[in-house]
Amino acid sequence: MGDVKKKGKQYFKKGKVLWVLKYGDRLYGKVLGGYPYYVEVSIKGGKNRCTCPIGKDCKHVSAVLEALKSGEYHETLNPLVELSPQAVVDEIIFGNLEIGKPIILKELIYYINHDESGSEAARLFRKAFALLKREFSAEFYESLQIQFEEFKRIFYDYGFTEELERELEDLKKFTSNNLASSSP
């Protein structure tokens, strides 16, 4: 088990823990390993499970516990977390761009490099675009442009690449118009 804890700590330090939610005495987390893995931990009972091939007591669980120790988690009272932790994370992201930006960017970078279909990366771009329409951030927009260039390099011949590029351009126009109309 010592090796598992060591590997989990390394995963945490390398930024592979995408998010952790604490709901009562339970933790729910998403860890970006060879694949994205979902973790559940009972803090008091010590019982845990992971969607990785090992299934429990693995480096992904250890990484989530490391995030808890380091205070890098979001507390929630939303019982929906038991059904869909991702939905609760999306609610948190949508409510606070400062929390959402690093989560979406980290996940986007992961999927651009790991998703052969490009589907998850495209979904994340659309999620990021929705956030930018809600609350514009030039820094976030520029980060998305950089990631999109990498996405376009890999998925240059996919039809939805052109669609995403149009959406990104429209978003630039949308924000420019909104910024111009809001100035005195």
Image (cartoon, rainbow, N blue to C red):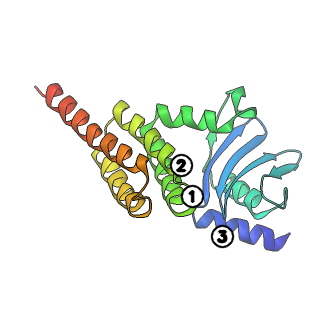
> Where 79 sits versus 39, above or below?
above
> Where 124 sits versus 154, above or below?
above
> Looking at the rendered structure, which numbered label has been put on residue 119?
2
Q: Residue furthest bottom?
A: 3
Q: Position of residue 121 (x, y in %)?
A: 50, 51
Q: Position of residue 113 (x, y in %)?
A: 52, 63
- Provide the secondary structure element on which disc 3 rests: helix
**Mark 3 to mark 1: distance in Å?**
23 Å
Q: Nearer the viewer, residue 162 or 93?
A: 162
- Provide the secondary structure element on which disc 1 rests: loop
Amino acid under label 2? Ser
The residue wearing badge 1 is 115
Q: Position of residue 54 (x, y in %)?
A: 84, 61
Residue at 76%, 56% (x, y): give it. 61
> Where 121 sits versus 184, above or below?
below
Amino acid under label 3? Gln
The residue wearing badge 3 is 10
